[in-house]
């Protein structure tokens, strides 16, 4: 009996029981499809994170406000943390620093004529933001250091925000009301998209001192300066990162009068963030791979189940084949190939389902997915392996049937 | 000339030490090429067991079985399967055709497992077609068993038994499931095949059918009760052993 005949016999048996064959394959179909979809999701997520991290700007160091030891339970004490002036100190005293950006956020209601937008992010920031964050202006200009110091009430809008507020009207030099404050629009950014989970196109950018003064005034500002959460430092040369971090640490420790061991700030690099994200996505990916692997095994058990039923059901057929000359090996090969065919056809349908499923998932959830060709190959070969592995026992059982008993079977 | 089938002290015992059932005991038979022999006996007399052993579906517990001069009593399952594919054709009471497969596919089945000749697919189809013509079903090639009458099904089964040109055809009550009209047709066909020179061994319950064969072996309780030369005289068992029948 040649391979082609074995394939034909197995194929015929599968085709004669279409519904049962499909149900048998379902486990494999779901298994293969889920392997592909899950790997596509994690690959897509990784790619998105990578792009986003690159989008945060290159050569960046994040100096964030830490908790001063001894302060009340995780709350920064009044004397702890970073201040607005620290940013200037870093810019002026640490060599190799190209730009320093400070941000202070607030959420306000914005009005223009009869358009009212609630809960808009107002980001108070400094003059270097466009360079550090890789942002380009679509119209008008950005505010200057002088405007920041003089607390000029000017605003630059994200493109989405501008569209919502002004629709067809030209936003430049229009007066809008932010909270209770009237501000003049001097520029509109080009589209920038999501960065670090924040929609940069839906924000309003204002001089940081305006935000300190009008939107987030603090009691102690006069005494200790305005508090900031993060200072972004852009370096001239990424090679000098270690050195620059060292110098910033020393400078801030001195300014805050703390030792380096109990610093009230932490310094993070781009690299640290990438590593953290990567380890998170790796864990995510591993979890998905396990889930998908388990579903493949369950699919294999399904095949074994149905094949065992099939062997019992077709005992008489096996007996007839044995009577006319089929050897135990012939019978084993027939059922093994049937199991293999079921899992391969299931695998193919699963491949298709996985590709389509990943596409549907991407469109439905807005999450990015990327089909990884290696995952298709892996899922498909696993399906074949599962078919052989779980087909072997039923096939051997069929091969061991006694022809006399089998012929007598009703 | 060596007999086609010869058994020496064929014995089959089922079961383990405590509950043993002797299905066959010390059976000595000899069947010559071209003979048409029937086997009769009440149920439990060992007819099926004898047929299974002669058909190489089973092995004797003791004794020897020579098929065409070759001792086949010690062969393993695979070797016996090879023998069945080339030397033996079965016809069963309940036809035992593969459902949902055409008559042609059913008849081609033994050729599929024939390693000795390794017929090409086209050759197999031609051979199956030919034997189906021979049994008068040239116009039913693509019918499935459920579309055929009992008589037609049994013809397909006979065609299947013929297709590999076996040394012997073993028919186990071939007319048992048929009405008398179809039964007669099947018997006519078997006699025609015998006329062509085929060797046929047939189990039957019907004395009238047995009477039309050359010899009838009567079994009782696993032993040969008597062997009757039809149209001849009743012979004692002892004398029948070793008797050869020259048919040519």
Image (cartoon, coloured by chain):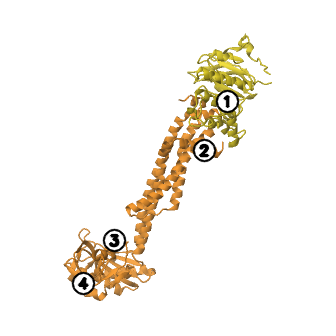
Chain colours: A orange, B yellow
**Residue B241 placement (x, y as % from top left):** 74, 16
Which is more N-terminal, label 4 or label 3? Answer: 4
**Residue A134 placement (x, y as % from top left):** 39, 79
Let me know if marks 1 and 3 both belong to one chain: no
Q: Which residue is mark 1?
A: B135
The numbered disc on residue A198 is: 3
Residues at circles 3 and 4 in contact by the CB criterion of under 8 Å: no
Rounded to the nearest angstrom, the CA distance separating label 3 from label 4 is 24 Å
When asked about the image quadrant of residue A184, the answer is bottom left
How dense is the environment of label 4, judged by Cα within 10 Å: few (below 14), some, or many (20 and up)? Answer: many
How dense is the environment of label 1, judged by Cα within 10 Å: few (below 14), some, or many (20 and up)? Answer: many
Let me know if marks 3 and 4 both belong to one chain: yes
Q: Which residue is mark 4?
A: A153
Which is more N-terminal, label 4 or label 2? Answer: 2
**Residue B159 placement (x, y as % from top left):** 66, 31
Q: Which chain does the residue under circle 3 lie in?
A: A
When asked about the image quadrant of residue B114, the answer is top right
Between A53 and B173, the residue placed more toward the observer is B173
* SS for dot 1: loop
The numbered disc on residue B57 is: none
In the image, residue A42 sits, relative to residue A257, either above or below, namely above
Q: Which chain does the residue under circle 4 lie in?
A: A
How dense is the environment of label 3, judged by Cα within 10 Å: few (below 14), some, or many (20 and up)? Answer: few
Q: Which residue is mark 2?
A: A8
Rounded to the nearest angstrom, the CA distance separating label 1 from label 3 is 84 Å
Rounded to the nearest angstrom, the CA distance separating label 1 from label 4 is 106 Å
* SS for dot 4: loop
* SS for dot 3: strand
């Amino acid at each position: 009996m040649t391979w082609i005949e074995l394939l034909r016999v197995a194929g015929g048996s599968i085709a004669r029981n279409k519904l049962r064959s499909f149900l048998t394959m379902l486990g494999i179909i779901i298994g293969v499809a889920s392997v592909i979809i899950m790997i596509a999701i994690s690959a897509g997520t990784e790619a998105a994170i990578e792009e986003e991290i690159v989008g945060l700007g290159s050569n960046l160091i994040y100096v964030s406000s830490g908790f001063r030891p001894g302060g009340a339970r995780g709350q920064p004490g009044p004397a702890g943390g970073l201040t607005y002036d620290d940013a200037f100190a870093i810019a002026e005293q640490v060599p190799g620093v190209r730009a320093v950006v400070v941000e202070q956020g607030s959420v306000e209601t914005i009005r223009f004529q009869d358009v009212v937008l609630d809960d808009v992010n107002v980001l108070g920031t400094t003059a270097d933001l466009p360079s550090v964050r890789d942002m380009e202006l679509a119209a008008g200009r950005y505010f200057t250091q002088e405007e920041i110091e003089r607390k000029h009430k000017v605003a630059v809008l994200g493109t989405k925000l501008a569209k919502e507020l002004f629709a067809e009207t030209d936003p430049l030099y229009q007066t809008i009301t932010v909270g209770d404050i009237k501000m003049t629009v001097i520029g509109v950014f080009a589209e920038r998209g999501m960065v670090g989970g924040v929609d940069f196109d839906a924000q309003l950018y204002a001089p940081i001192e305006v935000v300190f003064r009008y939107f987030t005034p603090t009691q102690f500002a006069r005494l200790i300066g305005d508090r900031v959460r993060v200072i972004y430092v852009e370096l001239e040369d990424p090679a000098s990162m270690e050195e620059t971090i060292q110098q910033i640490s020393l400078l801030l420790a001195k300014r805050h009068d703390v030792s380096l061991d109990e610093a009230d700030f932490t310094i993070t690099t781009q690299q640290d963030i990438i590593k953290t994200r990567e380890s998170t996505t790796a864990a995510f990916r591993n979890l998905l791979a396990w889930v998908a692997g388990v579903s493949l095994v369950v699919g294999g058990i399904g095949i074994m189940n149905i094949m065992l039923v099939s062997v019992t059901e077709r005992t008489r057929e096996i007996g007839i084949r044995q009577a006319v000359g089929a050897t135990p090996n012939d019978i084993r090969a027939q059922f093994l190939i049937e199991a293999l065919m079921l899992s391969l056809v299931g695998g193919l349908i699963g491949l298709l389902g996985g590709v389509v499923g990943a596409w549907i998932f991407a469109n439905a959830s807005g999450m990015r997915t990327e089909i990884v060709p290696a995952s298709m190959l892996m899922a498909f070969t696993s399906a074949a392996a599962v078919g052989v592995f779980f087909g072997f026992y039923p096939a051997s059982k069929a091969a061991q049937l006694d022809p006399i008993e089998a012929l007598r079977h009703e | 000339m060596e007999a086609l089938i010869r058994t020496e002290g064929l014995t089959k015992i089922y079961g383990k030490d405590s509950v043993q059932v002797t299905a066959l005991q010390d059976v000595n038979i000899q069947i010559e090429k071209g003979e048409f022999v029937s086997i009769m006996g009440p149920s439990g007399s060992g007819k099926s067991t004898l047929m299974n052993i002669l058909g190489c579906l089973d092995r004797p517990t003791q004794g020897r079985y020579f098929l065409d001069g070759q001792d086949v009593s010690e062969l393993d399952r695979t070797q016996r399967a090879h023998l069945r594919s080339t030397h033996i054709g079965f016809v069963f009471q309940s036809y035992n055709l593969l459902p949902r497969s055409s008559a042609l596919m059913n008849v081609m089945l033994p050729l599929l497992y024939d390693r000795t000749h390794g017929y090409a697919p086209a050759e197999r189809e031609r051979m199956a077609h030919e034997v189906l013509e021979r049994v008068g079903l040239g116009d039913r090639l693509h019918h499935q068993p459920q579309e055929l009458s009992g008589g037609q099904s049994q013809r397909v089964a006979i065609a299947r038994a013929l297709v590999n040109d076996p040394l012997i055809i073993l028919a186990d009550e071939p007319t048992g499931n048929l009405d008398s009209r179809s039964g007669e047709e099947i018997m006519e066909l078997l006699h025609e095949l015998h006329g062509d020179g085929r060797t046929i061994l047939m189990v039957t319950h019907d004395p009238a059918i047995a009477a039309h064969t050359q010899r009838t072996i009567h079994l009782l309780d696993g032993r040969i009760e008597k062997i009757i030369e039809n149209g001849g005289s009743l012979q004692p068992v002892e004398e029948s052993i070793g008797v050869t029948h020259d048919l040519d």
